[in-house]
Amino acid sequence: MRSCLLVCGIAWVLNAVGAQASRAVLPKALHTLVSAPGVARQLFPLKRHPVVTLTFDDLPAAGGLAPDETRVDIVTRLTRELRANHLKGIYGFVNAVDLNGDSDTQQALRVWVGAGMNIGSHTWSHPSLTSETPAAYEHNIALDEPALRQYGGKRNWHWFRYPYLEAGDTVAKREDVRGWLYEHGYRIAEVSLNFEDDDWNDPYLRCKTKHDNAGIAWLKRTYLENAAEFIPRGREEEQIALGHEIPNVLLLHATDFTTLMLPSLIQLLRQEGFHFASLPKVEKNHAYAIDPVVGVADGGTFIQLILMHRHLRLPSFRPEPVQELNSVCR
């Protein structure tokens, strides 16, 4: 499964602007996949009917919260939109530290599971595996389990999502934690598509507090532009890494702004031809059995780790507007 497929001999090179731009959003360890400048970008043809499952990290308290909002408000709106689009059994990944003594977050998680959604582990307190020993990290995962049992009931909550998508900065650490997860019955909820949706939440809260409608309009537009840029790029990465596209797992966060934008995001996905499926069904695809044994300090998607392991090149893309997000509504 780890041998190179059809595309192992393809040499990918980016133009100078694309190569520089990609460094703003790629994990540092993946910068080496950007080759020398000078050749214009190529595009793979994309499938007409791709498949995706939506997943939500950082339940029940993702991102900042406006003074007039509650976690129950956000999760209620989020689950209502999912159900309106016939999306049931969606996985949300829980940090149980946010439940401690907080009736709002406790009720928000009840609303999530009461709406027919599933939960999995995101560790107890969202630590960075790069900064933790395997033993400390595994203990943090174990601390999450009582809440998963309490709120998940008979649901299959043995799905795990690495915080920051950090699966280990060394191969030894990676293999230690993966071994613990498998021994304790967990399946890793890999990610193939990510457009850093949570980076828009704090700017949105600033604009909302200032009643800056122009700023909010800019955030809505650029959020969708970023999704429209990075989702096709993720699909291209699959073709470079594997020689073909696979059913996708899209990483989202249960923030106020992503909840606001979910109807537009789902519409964008449908316009791109996406069909929706469950996480267990998507990750039955044999590609998700690949284990790219590589240490990466600052994480990356499942496909990006395969690219790094196989020394393959990334397609170019327009960068996320990091500076503008940091400055809007200041």
Image (cartoon, grey):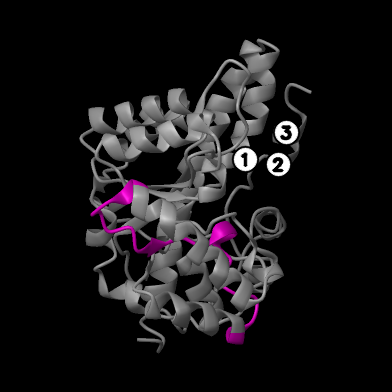
**Label 2 CA crowd tier, 10 Å (few <14, some 14–19, many 20+):** few
Q: Are marks 3 and 2 in contact (CB under 8 Å)?
A: yes
Q: Amino acid at mark 3?
A: Glu
| Quadrant containing the C terminus in the rendered view | top right
Q: Depth-wise, is mark 1 or mark 3 nearer the camera?
A: 1
Q: In the rendered structure, find residue 199 and report the number of the disc placed on it.
A: 1
CB under 8 Å between discs 2 and 1: yes
**In the structure shown, which secondary structural element does the residue marked by tag 3 occupy?**
helix
Left/right of residue 83 with respect to residue 229 in the rendered view: left
Residue assigned mark 3: 324
Q: Which residue is mark 2?
A: 322
- Seen in the image, is 185 located left or right of residue 223? left
Q: Earlier in the sequence, mark 1 or mark 3?
A: 1
Image quadrant for the N terminus? bottom left
Residue at image position (49%, 61%) is: 42
Q: CA distance from mark 3 to mark 2?
A: 6 Å
